[in-house]
């Protein structure tokens, strides 16, 4: 067979596979439709006259095209964004949501991956890095929406649902899929981000869990890894300390005078933390617990100290913030409690 035809068929195969998402219990119908469409196309190709496949036919357009804004074929593997995580169709590798958030990836980005081990089920683990990013949005991008900081509650019939977020009540009740509940080990009280396609808003998936019961202690680093400023003494915001929103009568009114504090995590109490720190004479900045390195570093450069709320911060952001603060000579402390009093006293102890 002509090499041009062979390349064209190879490209067609990859494009067809791009259109077929990983099979789950929630998308059986849509996968069946995609498979039927692919079968119809292949049947039509099989009926083409023999001359179509002859080597004297004009060569088809190249299969691999530069991404928008690039003048050469891109390097790496093109990522297809999913509701949770991403997918590299040409190598059949899933990109976890943690990597998507750490690298601030978008649909159409090109990644490199290096094997770093094997999971318990035999699948390989990879380290992902951004190779290239198109200058313009890819033509096949599908608009994706997120609902941040939704609160998981018990629903009718024993299931789990979401009907409010950090911004207040939702206009409708959202039932969480049994697959997400089981896969992510969700329970009432967890705080999650939800994702959906703009053209199919009824298909809602949990894309990120801000706090899990088993991860609370893991998010607090051992003493040997804590910054020297915090390891040298028992922090006021230790797990044994109070976690209330009581008054700060025992703290000097000007304890944070002239100081700027960055609090990372817990959007629901952001305004209360800011009011408390202002009452102590300081100024507060805030960052999401899933913030990327670039935004974290920009915020850390502007402050005197960083308070990391370990219940509402992913592990990668925790270590990124700790390393960045140390690199810029900014004090940092981990605070496992969320009370206004606990967070305020942690900031005072850090900067006093």
Image: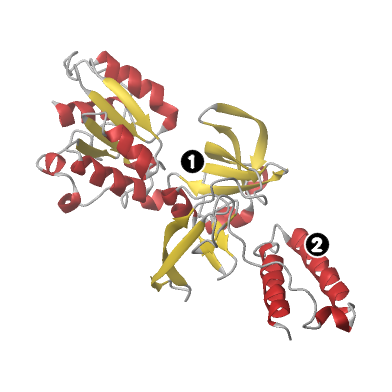
Q: Nearer the viewer, residue 131 or 172?
A: 131
Task: State the quadrant of the N terminus.
Answer: bottom right
Residue 233 image position (x, y, % from top left):
10, 39
Q: Nearer the viewer, residue 15 or 252?
A: 15
Q: Nearer the viewer, residue 2 or 248?
A: 2
Residue 7 image position (x, y, % from top left):
67, 76
* Residue occupying image coordinates x 59% and y 27%: 169
Q: Is residue 233 left or right of residue 1?
A: left
Q: In the figure, 302 relative to 72: above or below?
A: above
Camera-nearest label, 1 or 2: 2
Residue 338 is tagged as none
Residue 158 image position (x, y, % from top left):
63, 48
Residue located beneath label 1 in the image: 189
* Residue occupying image coordinates x 86% and y 75%: 43
Whole-angstrom CA distance, mark 1 to mark 2, is 37 Å
Residue 189 image position (x, y, % from top left):
48, 40
Q: Is residue 341 visible?
A: yes
- Disc 1 to disc 2: CB gap under 8 Å: no
Residue located beneath label 2 in the image: 33
Q: Which secondary structure lies at badge 1? A: loop
State the residue lying farthest toward the left: 232
Q: Which secondary structure lies at badge 2? A: helix
Q: Is residue 337 visible?
A: no
Q: In the figure, 320 relative to 272: above or below?
A: below
State the residue lying farthest toward the bottom: 1
Labels in figure, total: 2
């Amino acid at each position: 067979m002509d090499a041009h035809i062979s390349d064209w068929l190879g490209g067609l195969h990859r494009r067809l596979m791009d259109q077929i998402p990983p099979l789950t219990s929630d998308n059986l119908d849509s996968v069946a439709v995609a498979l039927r469409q692919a079968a119809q196309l292949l049947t039509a190709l099989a009926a083409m006259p023999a001359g179509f496949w002859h080597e004297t036919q004009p060569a088809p357009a190249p299969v691999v095209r530069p991404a928008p804004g690039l003048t050469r074929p891109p390097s790496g593997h093109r990522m297809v964004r999913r509701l949770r995580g991403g997918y590299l169709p040409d190598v059949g590798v899933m990109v976890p949501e943690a990597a998507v958030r750490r690298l601030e990836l978008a649909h159409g980005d090109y990644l490199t991956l290096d094997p770093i081990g094997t999971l318990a089920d035999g699948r390989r683990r990879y380290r992902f890095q951004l190779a290239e990013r198109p200058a313009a949005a890819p033509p096949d991008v599908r608009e994706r929406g997120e609902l941040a900081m939704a609160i998981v509650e018990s629903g009718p019939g024993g299931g789990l649902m979401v009907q409010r977020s950090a911004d207040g009540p939702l206009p409708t009740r959202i039932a969480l899929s049994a697959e997400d509940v089981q896969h992510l080990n969700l329970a009432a009280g967890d705080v999650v981000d939800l994702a959906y396609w703009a053209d199919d808003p009824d298909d809602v998936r949990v894309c990120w869990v801000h706090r899990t019961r088993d991860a609370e202690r893991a998010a607090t680093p051992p003493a040997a890894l804590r910054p020297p400023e915090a390891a040298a003494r028992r922090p006021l915001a230790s797990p044994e300390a109070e976690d209330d929103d009581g008054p700060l009568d025992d703290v000097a009114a000007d304890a944070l005078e002239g100081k700027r504090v960055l609090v990372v995590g817990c959007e629901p109490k952001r305004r209360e933390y800011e009011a408390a720190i202002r009452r102590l004479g300081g100024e507060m900045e805030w960052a999401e617990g899933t913030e990327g390195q670039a935004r974290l570093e920009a915020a850390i450069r502007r402050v005197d100290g960083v308070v990391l709320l370990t219940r509402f911060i992913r592990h990668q952001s925790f270590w990124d913030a700790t390393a960045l603060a140390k690199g810029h000579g900014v004090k940092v402390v981990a605070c496992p409690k969320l009370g206004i009093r606990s967070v305020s006293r942690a900031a005072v102890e850090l900067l006093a």
